[in-house]
Image (tube, helix red, strand yellow):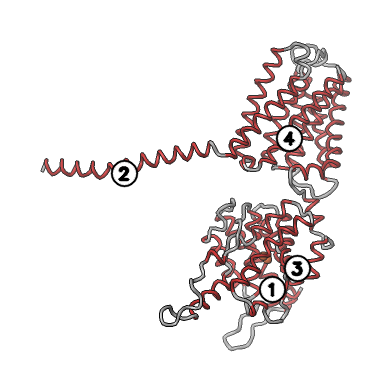
Amino acid sequence: MAASRRVGGMALLRKTSPRRDQVRRNIGTERSLWCSRLMDADVIISLLIWLAFVALCIGVLSFGLAQQGRYRALAASSLIVVFAAVGGGLYAYHYQNRLLRNHAKALALVVLFPALLAVTKLGSLSSGNALWGLGWGVGTAVLTAIILVIAYDQRFAIGMSALYCVLASLAVGPKPDQAFQLQGMRLFLTMIAGAAVCCFTLKEIRTRMKLLEVSALAAAVVFLTAMAVPYLNFLGEPPKGLTVFQASGYYACAAFLAGLLMQSLLPLIEKLFRIATSMTLLDYSDANQALLKKLAMEAPGTFSHSLLIGSIAEAAAEAVGCNGLLCRVGAYYHDIGKINKPKYFTENEMGSTSKHKELSPAMSQLIIVGHVKDGLEMAKEFGLPIVLHQFIETHHGTTLVEPFYHEARRKYEESGPGGASKRLIESPPSESEFRYAGPRPRSREAAIIMLADAVESATRSLSDVTLAKVEAVVHNIAMKRLEDGQFDECDLTLRELSQIEASMSKSLAAHYHGRIAYPTAPDGSSRLPKPSVAKMVET
Ligand SMILES: [Fe+2]
Ligand SMILES: [Fe+2]
């Protein structure tokens, strides 16, 4: 019995050894993967950008200190810059991970911070002991916050603005000012108050007044903070009321002027950070835009399809907290590549026979898939904002062009068996040949457009539209895209997908309400709605 147990134990040992080996191999593979990730080109470039950031900030802050021989202050400032940059780097890694891959945007940030620090430093040095000297710090802090919130998002802007306020406090440096002994703290609190107001109130710029409103509010908060903070000095002499009032007025003016300046710098910021504000997007949603006019003239079916997708996608995007306007404008331009060969697309056939009848499935597939590449070329030619390009290149992802793939398979099956009568088509068509080249959607907005595009086309072909049928079609297509891995590269959750499905079903049912059949009564007579309801449906 004991022997059998031992034998059993030995067997068990022998059984577990390969597992241990496997675990060791897995750990080894994980380590090598970690090392290769560490040595990834993106990480190396990001580290170099980070080093450039530290070097530039230290360079700006050392100006003046080195000449005066204040090497201890210089060393202390450099140490704080390194700590602040480590904090900023970790913050960016956690909350704006895309910066690791988007080097242009990271570089823009590296240019922005030292440039604004240099303005603060030079302004502060040139103003001597004048009361308005610290206003440079407040003005640039507000400017930084506005730029960051426009170029990135509110959470990232708040964190990075705090980092800028620390650096700007160092740039202004202590001044022999007897009136305020808590100068550094006062300046930091005043700057962060102005920056925080901008970050929290400026979600998007839809009107030309928005920046002025935000900067006026920031100026009011800056004024109140600058008025209050000097009175935190409990130990020394109380500050002179008039001086505090004057200084607070200067800082408030600086905050407001920063907003005014931003108004004129906006096009430059959009180019530098490769973004489009809501104002720019609204400009591109105008039907008088050259590209939209061309689409309406040459591919009217595609134009109306794009308009419908725009309204479906906007509602769905807003239901899950995405950028609805971006989705709408992206939808308007997603199929512009069809302008080159409009008649090859169903929505532009207008009752004429399909042009694909004369072509082989492979040739038809090439024409259909080509509209993505053509669209991107046109977008570049017409200077469409970069943020809209994603909708053109990802709206089909790597999906299969099913009709032509099935047609090719059918032709292959019909071409006869091998052997006695040789097949006319040598090898069966593979799915990969009939797929779009991608890429797959990388943002939730792009995923919404992909889904809206597919469901709109599918519901258009339904004979009698009912809400249940629309819901079934939308759900089937969403599941098909999900199982096909089309949403693998974006942050869409299953909960959001279900909310998007519900919103799209509702929008499509509302759009096709004229085609929804009323249920028939058991006696065969149609159950007509009450007059008031009928009136509501008609409008
Ligand atoms: Fe398309
Ligand atoms: Fe489309």
- Residue 212 appears in view: no
The residue identified by callout 4 is 196
Q: Dot 3: what SS?
A: helix
Nearest the eye: 528 or 434 = 434
* Residue 525 left/right relative to 287: left
The residue carrying pointer 2 sits among few (fewer than 14), some (14 to 19) or many (20 or more) residues within 10 Å by Cα, namely few
- Quarter location, residue 419: bottom left
Q: Which residue is mark 3?
A: 303
Res 434 label: none
Element under label 1?
Answer: helix
Q: Tell me residue 405's x, y (percent).
A: 55, 71
Q: Earlier in the sequence, mark 4 or mark 2?
A: 2
Where residue 389 appears, as percent x and y from the top left, is 70, 55
Q: How far apart are the alpha carbons under marks 4 and 3?
A: 42 Å
Count up the numbered dots. 4
- Is the distance from the Cβ of mark 4 to the nearest ligand 2 atom less than 8 Å? no
Name the N-terminal-most of marks 4 and 3: 4
Which element is circle 2 on? helix
Q: Amino acid at mark 3?
A: Phe
Identity of the amino acid at label 2? Arg
- Return the residue at label 1: 344
| Marked residue nearer the N-terminal end (2 or 1) | 2
Q: Is residue 520 above or below residue 196?
A: below
Q: CA distance from mark 4 to mark 1?
A: 53 Å
Residue 66 spot, x, y in % from top left: 75, 15
